[in-house]
C-alpha cells in the first residue's frame, strides 16, 4: 500500500487541513492562517531548522547505516521488540507514527512488518532515513518537532518513540503531546533513559564539557576512546576504568563510536524511573499499562471512551 501522507497533514499552528498537495509545489505549502511549510529535498519541513538537535543531524549523517538491519531479526529489530513488545501482528496494516526516527532503523522494521509508517524527527536525520528507505512506499518522513506535530487528534493506531523524549527539554511534556494523536483503542510505547548507576554521574560530569565541544572534534575523540573497550573488559581493573572513562561496550567498533557520541553530544538528556514513567501513563488516562523489562520501556492503550479533549 502507498501511504498518502498529504491527506494526514494539518497546520501545526491553527490545526486546519493544509491546502491540496498541488499547491505544495516543490517549495512550500501555505496555510490559510498565513504559516507556510517548506518541502525540500522531497521532505516536508515543519521547522525552520534542527534547533537544539544539531548533534543528531551530525550523528545520523555520519552513521547513516551503522544500525540499519540488513537481515530480518537483526539487532535493531531485536531492540525494537525488546523496547516496545510489538510483534508483526500488532503493526501489520496499522497507521503508525514514529517520533524521533533518526536514520530510520525502527521505521525499517515496522514497515517491513507491514505497517504504514509516518516517521518524524527534528534533525536532518530524516534525510538519511528517507534515503535508506527510499524503496518503501509505506513509509514517509517529515522534519518536525514533537511538540508541534502536523496531525489531527486521533489519527494513529500506534505511536512509538524509542530513545527520543529524554532528549527534549521536557520529557514528560513531550509524552503528553503525543497521546491525543492516538485513536481510542490505539497503543503508545516509549523507551527513555533510566536513572543509572554511578558511572552515569561521571559521564554526566563530562557532558558539561562535551556538549560544548564541536561535533567534529568530539566525534574524533570518540574514535580515540574506542580501544578503551579492551581495557574496560579486564577483570577488576575494567570496573575502575569504566567508572572513570565511561564509553560504549558494544562489540562492534563503529557502533561504539556512534553510541559514545550519542551519549556525550546531545544538548538535553534526562534520566527517568519506571515509576515516574508509569505515572505519566496513568495521568494521561492510558489503560493496560505495561512496564517492560528494558528500563525504562512502558506502553499503554488509549481507552475507547477517551476523546481528543481529554488529553488535548
Ligand atoms: C538518540 S536519537 C534516537 C533515534 C532513533 N529513535 C533510534 O533509536 O535510532 C534521538 C532522536 O530524537 C530526535 N529528537 C530530539 N528532539 C526531538 C523533537 N523535539 N522532536 C522530534 N525529534 C526529536 C533527534 O533529532 C534524534 O534523531
Image (cartoon, rainbow, N blue to C red):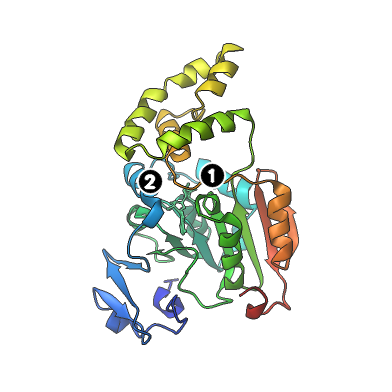
Q: Quadrant of the C terminus?
A: bottom right
**Which picture quadrant has residue 239?**
top right
Please report the residue visible at 32 percent of the width from the left and 46 percent of the height from the top.
61
Label whose residue precedes the other's in the sequence (1 or 2) = 2
Please report the residue visible at 35 percent of the width from the left and 58 percent of the height from the top.
130
Q: Quadrant of the N terminus?
A: bottom left
In the displayed structure, does residue 46 sit left or right of residue 247?
left
Q: Is the residue at mark 1 in contact range of ligand 1, meaning its CB lies under 8 Å from it?
A: no
Q: Nearer the viewer, mark 1 or mark 2?
A: 2
Residue, disc 2: 55
Please report the residue visible at 31 percent of the width from the left and 79 percent of the height from the top.
29
Label 2: which secondary element: helix
**Which picture quadrant has residue 39?**
bottom left
Q: Please state the horizontal and vertical placement of residue 266, each as a whole percent of the image.
A: 44, 44
Q: Which mark is residue 73?
A: 1
Label 1: which secondary element: loop
Q: Would you place residue 232 above or below residue 8 in this image?
A: above
Q: Would you place residue 167 above or below residue 30 in this image?
A: above
Amino acid at each position: 500500500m502507498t501511504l498518502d501522507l498529504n491527506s494526514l497533514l494539518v497546520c501545526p499552528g491553527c490545526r486546519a487541513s493544509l491546502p491540496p498537495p498541488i499547491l505544495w509545489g516543490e517549495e512550500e505549502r501555505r496555510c490559510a492562517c498565513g504559516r507556510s511549510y517548506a518541502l525540500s529535498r522531497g521532505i516536508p519541513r515543519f521547522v525552520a531548522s534542527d534547533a537544539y538537535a544539531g548533534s543528531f543531524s551530525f550523528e545520523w549523517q555520519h552513521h547513516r547505516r551503522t544500525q540499519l538491519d540488513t537481515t530480518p531479526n537483526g539487532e535493531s529489530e531485536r531492540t525494537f521488540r525488546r523496547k516496545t513488545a510489538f510483534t508483526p501482528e500488532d503493526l501489520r496494516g496499522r497507521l503508525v507514527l514514529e517520533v524521533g526516527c533518526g536514520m530510520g532503523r525502527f521505521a525499517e522494521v515496522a514497515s517491513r512488518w507491514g505497517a504504514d509508517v509516518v516517521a518524524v524527527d527534528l534533525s536532518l536525520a530524516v534525510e538519511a532515513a528517507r534515503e535508506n528507505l527510499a524503496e518503501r512506499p509505506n513509509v514517509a518522513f517529515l522534519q518536525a518537532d514533537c511538540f508541534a506535530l502536523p496531525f489531527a487528534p486521533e489519527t494513529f493506531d500506534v505511536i512509538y518513540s524509542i530513545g527520543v523524549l529524554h532528549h527534549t527539554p521536557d520529557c514528560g511534556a513531550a509524552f503528553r503531546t503525543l497521546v491525543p494523536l492516538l485513536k481510542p483503542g490505539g497503543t503508545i510505547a516509549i523507551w527513555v533513559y533510566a536513572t543509572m548507576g554511578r558511572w552515569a554521574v561521571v559521564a554526566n560530569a563530562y557532558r558539561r564539557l562535551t556538549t560544548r565541544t564541536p561535533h567534529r572534534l568530539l566525534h574524533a575523540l570518540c574514535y580515540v576512546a574506542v580501544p578503551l573497550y579492551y581495557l574496560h573488559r579486564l577483570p577488576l581493573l575494567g570496573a575502575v576504568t569504566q567508572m572513570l572513562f565511561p564509553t560504549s561496550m558494544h562489540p562492534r567498533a563503529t557502533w561504539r563510536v556512534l553510541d559514545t557520541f550519542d551519549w556525550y553530544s546531545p544538548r538535553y538528556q534526562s534520566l527517568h524511573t519506571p515509576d515516574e514513567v508509569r505515572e505519566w501513563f496513568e495521568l494521561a488516562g492510558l489503560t493496560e499499562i505495561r512496564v517492560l523489562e528494558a528500563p525504562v520501556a512502558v506502553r499503554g492503550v488509549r481507552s475507547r471512551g477517551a476523546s481528543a479533549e481529554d488529553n488535548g
